[in-house]
Each structure stands twice: as structure tokens, then as C-alpha cells.
Amino acid sequence: MNLLSLADLHAKGIKFSRTHIYRLIKAGDFPKPIKVGRQRSAWIEVEIEKFIQSRVDERDRGAA
């Protein structure tokens, strides 16, 4: 299982601010991170990949 930092999310093209990401999490629109340290959180890569794919699927459904 690969874990992603905020910088890793940015590298995958998710350029949201930390504040916006946590706003989306609270709304149930973004995967929740896991705690990997006292002041460090990370996201599970497969969950982020599913999030990205859901955005692509949403776009494609709108185009059909």
C-alpha cells in the first residue's frame, strides 16, 4: 500500500490547497487521510486513484 503526502497529491495533478482538501473531506467528496505520525497525515494511493477516476467518469457521463 502506497501512501501519498500533500505534495504527492499535487504531483498527481490535485492542486487543491490543504484547506480546500479538508473542506471536501468534511463534505464527503474526497478520501479521508490516515494518521501516519503525530502531526502527519497521508492518503492511500488507491483511494486517490479511485477519486481521480470518478472525476473522469463524471466528465464522460456528462459528455454522453
Image (cartoon, rainbow, N blue to C red):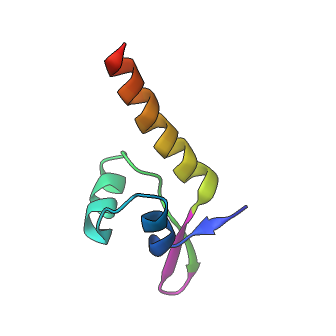
Quadrant location of the C terminus in the rendered image: top left
Quadrant location of the N terminus in the rendered image: bottom right
Instruction: Name the side, left or right, on which 17 lies relative to 38.
Output: left
Instruction: Name the side, left or right, on which 62 lies relative to 56.
Output: left
Task: Identify the residue shown where x is 36% and y is 45%.
Answer: 29
Please state which of residues 10 and 27 is positioned toward the viewer in this rendering. Answer: 10
Q: Is residue 44 above or below residue 60?
A: below
The percent position of residue 15, horizontal first and vertical second, equals: 34, 63
Q: Is residue 42 above or below residue 14?
A: below
The percent position of residue 54, horizontal first and vertical second, equals: 47, 35
The single residue placed furthest to the bottom in the displayed view is 38
The percent position of residue 57, horizontal first and vertical second, equals: 45, 28
Magenta stretch, main secondary structure, is: strand
Instruction: Name the side, left or right, on which 15 lies relative to 5.
Output: left
Please state which of residues 3 and 8 is positioned toward the viewer in this rendering. Answer: 8
Magenta stretch in the rendered image: 37-43
Q: Is residue 33 above or below residue 52?
A: below
The percent position of residue 26, horizontal first and vertical second, equals: 32, 54
Q: Does 9 lie within the magenta span? A: no
**Quarter holding residue 59:** top left
Please state which of residues 41 and 3 is positioned toward the viewer in this rendering. Answer: 3
Task: Identify the residue shown where x is 56% and y is 48%.
Answer: 49
Task: Identify the residue shown where x is 45% and y is 72%.
Answer: 6
